Amino acid sequence: MALIELKQLDKRFGQTHVVKNLNLDIADREFLVLLGPSGCGKTTTMRMIAGLEEPSGGEICFDGVRVNELPTQLRDVAMVFQNYGLYPHMNVYDNIAYPLKLQKVGAEVREQRVSKAASRVGLEPYLHRMPKELSGGQRQRVALARAIVRNPRVFLMDEPLSNLDAKLRVTARAEIKNLSEELGVTTVYVTHDQVEAMTLAHRVAVMNDGVIQQLGRPEDIYNDPANVFVAGFIGSPAMNLLPVQASTQGVRWRDGVNVALRPPREGQLVLGVRAEDMHLTAEGDGHFSAEVFTFELLGDCSMVNFKLGETLLSVKASKSLRLARGERVHVRLPQDRLYWFDAASGERLRD
Amino acid sequence: MTAHRQHLPSATTLLAQRWSFEFFHAAGVLLIVGVIVLPIFWITLTAFKEPRDVYALASALHFTPTLENFTTVFAHPWNIGQKIVNSVLVATGTVLVAIPMATMAAYAFSRFQFAFKRTLFLLVIASQFIPAAVVVLPFFLMFKAWGLLDTRIALVMVNLSIVLPYAVWMIKGFLDAVPLEIEESAMVDGASRARVIWEIVVPAAWPGIITAAVFSFTLTWNEFLFALILGKQHALTLPIGLIGFRTERGDLWELMAAGGLLITLPMFVLSLMVQKHFVGSLTAGSVR
C-alpha cells in the first residue's frame, strides 16, 4: 500500500526526450492507467517507478519518501511484464515461489501462499509444468500469480494483456479488475488500449510525446476531453475530428458546405463529434449530406462511414439499417454534444 | 487448365528425379561417414594388432586381437598413465578457471554499456588471429623466467589464453538470447544482481555454458604446440606422448594407435554424456 508521487520527472535517452517534466500523484489503493500510443513515454514512466530506469531529473516518492536512489530489489514493487518474463528453467510453482524465496519466507508459509496465489488465478493443475509447456494465457496468469504472491507496496503492469488473443483478453481483463478490487493495492497499469483503460482505471492519465495530456476519471476523459489528442485517442471508433473555418454565420469545411452551428469563436477550428452523437435523418432535417463510403454491420449496431473533404467520418446507426456504397445520407449534428478545438494548438475551446 | 497441365512433369519423371536425389543423398552421406569414420576404424583395429600384423595386408581385417599394446604404453618408458593424468588435470583446470571467467566477461559484454565495448570485444576475438608459432617463444622465455617450465600450471595458463576468447564469444551468444525481461523480473522480485546472474541467467544459458566448457576441454585436450615446447618431462600431455612413438626404430604404429584410442575415448564419452544437455534452447517459454 503506498502513495506514489512523481515530481517533475524527466527522462532522456541521449537526444530523445522521452518523459518531460511529469507530475503525478497516485493515491493509495488507486488503480491508475497510463494510456497512450507507443513511444509516448508511458512504459518509461512505469520503469522509472520500478527502478529499472534511472530518471534524468525529478523525484519519485513512495509514501513521501524519495526512492530515486533505492535499487529495484528494495522498492518492494511487483511487476507484470508485457511478455511475462517467466523464469524458463523453473516450473510454475518455483516461478511463483521465487519472490518469497528471496524474502526468505519459510518453506511452509511459502507453500501456502503459492497455492493460494495459484488457485486465485486458476493455475493449480499446472504447478509442475515448465513455462514452455503453457499457453499464452496460462503464462500470463503465472506472471500475475508471481506478482500477487507477496504483498507488494505497488503493482506495476506493463501491457499485460497485449499478447493475448482478443477473446482471452476480455476474460483476463475482468480477472485483473476483480483481483485489483479484492487486493486493494496501488496499481499502475500501462496500456495503449483505451478499452482496457476505460474499464479498469479509477483514473486515466492520457500521455503523448512524454507529456500527460489529461488526467481524470474514465468518464471525464471520454465525455470531456481536454484537447484534440485525447478526443482522437479515446473511444472506439475515435471521435470524428473535422477541420473547419468558423465565422459568425456558422462553419464551413473544405468543399464549401456551410452549416449553421454556433462555434465558440471565429477562425480555424477543429470540430469534434462522437459517432454515437450524430444521427442519420430525413432530407431537409440534416445539417449536410454525403455519400456512403463504406457501410459496416457490427452486430449490435452499424457504422456508416463517409468522407467530408479528406476526412473520413463515422456515424453509429441502428443494426437494422442497410446502406450501399454511394448512397446519399443526411446527417444531423447534435448542437449540445459538439466539441471545439483550436486548430493550431489543439486545445479544447469552451463556450 | 490444359495449358497448366502441359507444364507439369509426368509421374515417371518425378519418380526418376526422386530416385536420383535419393541416390546422391545416400552417396554424399556415405562419403562423409567414410572420411570421418574410416580412420577411426583403422586406428581401432591397429591398436589391437601385434606389430607383425600392422604392415601385413593379409591380416588387415583377420588377425588375433591382443591387449599387449595397451599394457606396453602404460609401462616404462612410455608411461602414458602419467600423461593421461597431466592431460586430465590441465584440461579440467583450464575449464574450471575459464568458464566462470568467461561467463562473467560475456555477461558484461552482453549486458553492460561501457566505452569501447565493441573495440574491446573485437580485440578479445582478434587475439586468436595471432599464430601460436609467433607467441610460443615469448611464452617459453616468460615461463623460464618464472621458473614454471615443465609445469602443469604453465600449461593451464597458456591454454586459458587460447580458450578464453572462444568461450567468451560462445557464451555471449547464449546470454544475448536470454531475454532481458527475466532479469528485470528477478530484480523486481527482489534479487540482487549477483543472484540474478547466478539463479536466473546462468541456468537459462546453461546449455551454452556446457557447450563452451566441452569445447574448451577439447581444445585443451588436443593442444600440441605449447605442450611440446613448454613441457620436458613432468608436464607432458597425451598428444606429446603420442609423438614419442616415432622412434629411431621407426614409427610404432600399434602403440600409437593404442595411445590414439586413449586420447579419443574420453572425448567420445564426454560428448555422449553432454549430448543430453542440448535439448534445444532452454529459454523457450520464458517470454511470450
Image (cartoon, rainbow, N blue to C red):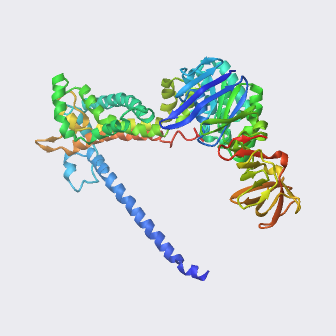
**Drawn side of residue B115 relative to residue A332, left or right:** left
Q: Quadrant of residue B4?
A: bottom right
Please say whether residue B72 is visible from this viewpoint: no
**Drawn side of residue B219 relative to residue A101, left or right:** left
Q: Quadrant of residue A260?
A: bottom right
- View extreme (front): residue: A248
A283 in relation to A230, above or below = below
Q: Residue at x 81, y 65 (%)?
A: A328
Image position, residue B147 (x, y; %): 17, 22
Residue toward you, B250 or B65 = B250
A144 in relation to B279, above or below = above
Residue toward you, A333 or A41 = A333
Please say whether residue A1 is visible from this viewpoint: yes
Quadrant of the image for the C terminus of chain B?
A: top right
Q: Residue at x 42, y 37 (%)?
A: B172
Image position, residue A1 (x, y; %): 70, 21
Residue toward you, A276 or B71 = A276
Quadrant of the image for the N terminus of chain B?
A: bottom right
Image position, residue A54 (x, y; %): 53, 28
**Drawn side of residue A339 relative to residue B59, left or right:** right
Q: Residue at x 44, y 67 (%)?
A: B21
